[in-house]
Amino acid sequence: MSAVSIPALLWAFAVFFGALALGLGLWYFAYGRWQFRRTQQQLERSQPKESGGMEDSSWDKRLAELARWGQKLRNMGTLEDRQQLLQAGFRQPYALPLFLLIRLMAGLALGMLVELYVLFAVHHPAGWAYLLWPFMGFVLGVLAPKFLLEMRAKSRIEGIAEELPFFVDLLALLQGVGLSLEQSLISVTAASDSGLPLISAEMREVSRQVAIGRPRVEAMQKLAEILKDPDFRELTNLLRQIDRYGGDVAEPLREFSERLQVKRQMSARERAGKMNAKMIVVLVTTMLPGLIIITAGPAFTVLVKALHHL
């Protein structure tokens, strides 16, 4: 194959895969909307009638099959991707398909850029470079959004862990002025400017779940499973026990807040100890050579001059 036909073939492949990715994305969103409308029509037609019988059963089976296919379509991607999207705060129904589409488009775009670099910037590239380098660019483009999502999820979980002691103190304070647990959680949710932006956002999501019928403590327990923070899980278990068995809420919250403060102090001491060990390595590798040169340098030069005159 000549040198002119290889770039043309690669361009054709790039255009084909780009058009394929765009077509798949448009098809997914169009099919989702069509499926939603069709499901609504099927539900309207399958309202229970007095005649009943096998006709209603057949409609139920068709609706169940349609719902099953819709669930399969929405369950694209791995469980880890869905978990990290929730941890990062992306709870929209289209978040997972959009994230997968972004990964695919980023891989194709980076692969095409690498291919252009090989074609126009590299002089006399090897034959394998026409395929290997774009493939490596495609893999890197697919993995980059995943890495950025992991960073955002981790940063958000750490931010929630930092806000948790203040959140517990605020709950204990509201309990001390006579509010119930439900009213305290609603007050924290409504106070978006209370210095708890992340936890307030999570509590608003909990309130939306409560509005559709789920108990608030159960919704918070579901949130703790998503965040996977041990302190937040312990707080949820504490609130669940208080909600089930009753009793004073302010005093257990104060004790839990004190445990959080002690835990944070121990964590800060541990980080300080690790920082001291790291600083020793930095001092040895940077300051020690300079100190040796300053202290032993003049004696070494005098010794060299003395040996030179012998």
Image: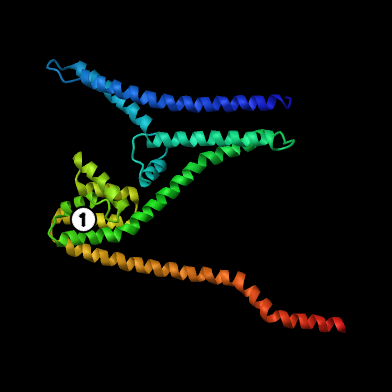
Across and down, in percent, residue 236 comes to 25, 54
Quadrant assignment, res 134: top right
Dividing the picture into quadrants, the one containing residue 281 is bottom right
Question: In this view of the protein, which residue sits in the foreground, 62 or 285?
Answer: 285
Q: Is residue 202 above or below residue 260?
A: above
x then y, percent, for residue 20: 51, 25
User: Quadrant where the N terminus lies?
Assistant: top right
Q: How many labels does the image show?
A: 1
Q: How is the image coloured?
A: rainbow
Label 1 sits on residue = 239
Image position, residue 67 (x, y; %): 30, 27
Q: What SS does tag 1 mark?
A: helix
Above or below, 218 against 59 in this view is below
Q: Where is residue 229 in the image (x, y as percent from the top left)?
A: 34, 55
Query: Left or right of 180: which side holds 285?
Result: right
Looking at the rendered structure, the kind of residue marked 1 is Leu
Q: Quadrant of residue 238?
A: bottom left
Question: Which quadrant holds the C terminus?
Answer: bottom right
What residue is at 56 percent from the left and 24 percent from the top?
Answer: 16
Using the image, determine if residue 272 lies above or below residue 75: below
Apparent side of residue 252 relative to residue 88 in the rendered image (left or right)? left
CA neighbours of label 1 inside 10 A, class few (<14), some (14 to 19), many (20+): many
Name the one closer to the observer, 194 or 245: 194
